[in-house]
Image (cartoon, grey):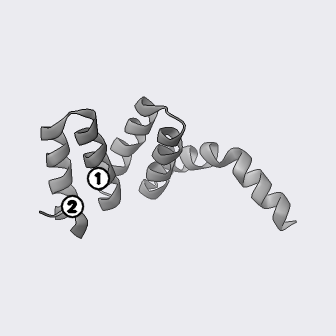
Amino acid sequence: MFLLFVLFYKLYELDIQAWSCDVEENTGSCLLTSRIYLSSGNLSMGEKYLRSSCKGEYPLGCFELGKFLIEKGEVEEGNNVLTKSCELGHEPACP
């Protein structure tokens, strides 16, 4: 039974996490959804869900969005987002 549950979850992980982010406004699920999209190479959807996570004031989501934006070349916005992450209490984002 447990194996069946794990298999089901793996098959629908993206759908479950995206639903939890979009409908339940679960910022942790937004971050997990972004990671799934980014790992598959879908940068635009990954960024969308990173922004949702940060908009919901999830410190780790802001931190990862800030790093993503800096890597993308949007340094000023990335630094602003990292500042927000620090203000939300995520120590690694603080200078």
Q: Secondary structure at mark 2?
A: helix
Where is the N terminus found, in terms of image quarters? bottom right
Query: Is 83 displayed left or right of 1 in the figure?
Result: left
Relative to 27, say whether 37 is above or below: above
Q: In the image, residue 16 lies at what x, y percent?
A: 62, 48
Q: Amino acid at mark 1?
A: Cys
Q: CA distance from mark 2 to mark 1?
A: 9 Å
Q: Find out whether the residues at labels 2 and 1 contact each other: C-beta distance under 8 Å.
A: yes
Q: Residue at x 82, y 67 (%)?
A: 2
Relative to 38, say whether 16 is above or below: below
| Crowd tier of the residue under label 1, counting other residues whose Cα lies within 10 Å: few below 14, some 14–19, many 20 or above | many
Q: Residue at x 29, y 52 (%)?
A: 62
| Crowd tier of the residue under label 2, counting other residues whose Cα lies within 10 Å: few below 14, some 14–19, many 20 or above | many
Q: Which labelled disc corresponds to residue 22?
A: none
Say which quarter of the image contains residue 88.
Answer: bottom left
Q: Which residue is mark 1?
A: 62
Query: Is 43 displayed left or right of 72 in the figure?
Result: right
Q: Which labelled disc corresponds to residue 93?
A: 2
